[in-house]
Image (tube, helix red, strand yellow):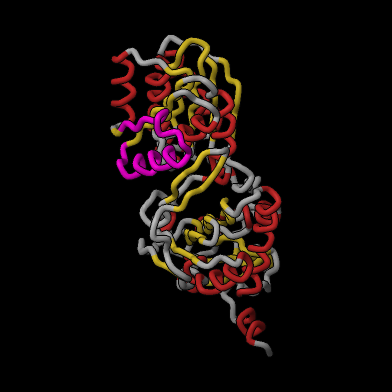
Amino acid sequence: MTASASLIDNRPVLRLKPKANARAIRHGSPWVFDNELVMDRRSRGIAPGSIARLEDHDRQPLGTVAVNPDSRIVGRMLDRDPEAVIDVAWFSKRLGKALSMRERLYDAPFYRLVHAEGDGLPGLIIDRFGDTCVVQPNAAWAETHLEALVEALVAVTGVANVLKNAGGRGRTLEGLDDQDAVLRGAAPEAPVPVVMNGATYMADLTGGQKTGLFFDQRDNHGFVARLAKDVQVLDVFSHVGGFGLAALAGGATRAVCVDGSAAALALATEGATRMGAADRFEARQGDAFDTLEELGNEGAKFEVVICDPPAFAPSKQAVDKGLRAYERIARLAAPLVAEDGYLCLCSCSHAADLSSFTGACLRGIGRSGRRAQLIYSGEAGPDHPLLPQLAESGYLKALVFRL
């Protein structure tokens, strides 16, 4: 008997309850919750990050799953083959599929390489910055199999450096630590310049938010940049200059970037300088809500205003509070938009669906006394593929209104 065969034969088993929806699993649903499973002493004793065989109530195999009994999501589907071996070869095949799509889409190696369930690697995020990859193993199985993952990642992509970012919210829910690490090569000694839509962004891969840069807004940046030629632009919650720098690349006469982080604004300023647009760029540090009110009191007007806040509704429990925050943002931002100007409002809250978010935006705009036309609805770019059976994978929403 081979070592692989022995591993499979000794694999623990998770079994669905009689009333659990096995059909949904067969049709692509990637998660199995604790209330769907027979959670006896044996299954509760499975070590987090282990690989198991998933069966329906009649003991018919459904596939190979990663297990974490300490999480509400006890099982994450890895492979429809119940005898799949999760090793370097398995990772290499999944990573190769992910890479081939990105190489077809992008002419430079700066993109999200792996988007968790959307790429068949649940709970795993990998962003690529040239010869460096930043990995977020946000599920216990990805942490447990990190060595095999990294070996495959280096072999498939040829990158020299692999960094681990342990700041994902999901790691806390999975009972994982928050310790960043260098897994291969070395961390960059300075922020990495990334060119998108003609703008230059400075990505801090070790001290910045998430993996250092948000690739998901790339296409939405490009659309807003088309509205920015020869006008003034306000970018609130700008991080390292996301929409503001894209607007400058699109020909904006002035871009004001607002953020609470001095470090993020310093990176935005450096990006503007590298673009040769420092004379058209202004950074304003402060609380976004307070700054919007201050600008309103000043009577400031911009032809394009963008608000791209963090997730105000990160969970179902926070949806109502989050929607009120989105409404308030819209109410404060709308008066700053010049007549026939444009307001872009974004949400990265997966728990607030598009309809609810749009309603909150329209309520805020209406309360400000403005009338709106919706001219654009955007999502994350194609390097953030959506798994149709998992609504949470389609988290990003970007709405552009003409006021």
Magenta stretch encompasses residue 277: yes
Horizontal relation, residue 45 to residue 261: left or right: right
Horizontal relation, residue 294 to residue 105: left or right: left
Q: Is residue 169 visible?
A: no
Residue 24's place in the image compared with 354, above or below, is: below
Magenta stretch encompasses residue 298: no
Q: Nearer the viewer, residue 119 or 260?
A: 260
Dividing the picture into quadrants, the one containing residue 80 is: bottom right
Q: Nearer the viewer, residue 43 or 396?
A: 396
Range of magenta residues: 260-284
Image quadrant occupied by the N terminus: bottom right
Residue 244 x, y percent position in the rendering: 46, 32
Single out the residue that lies furthest toward the bottom.
1
Dividing the picture into quadrants, the one containing residue 262 is: top left
Horizontal relation, residue 207 to residue 244: left or right: left
Residue 331's place in the image compared with 315, above or below, is: above
Q: Is residue 278 visible?
A: yes
Residue 238's place in the image compared with 121, above or below, is: above
Residue at 43%, 18% in the rendered image:
302
Residue at 64%, 48% in the rendered image:
387
Residue 17 x, y percent position in the rendering: 59, 59
Residue 279 x, y percent position in the rendering: 40, 30
Residue 246 x, y percent position in the rendering: 51, 34
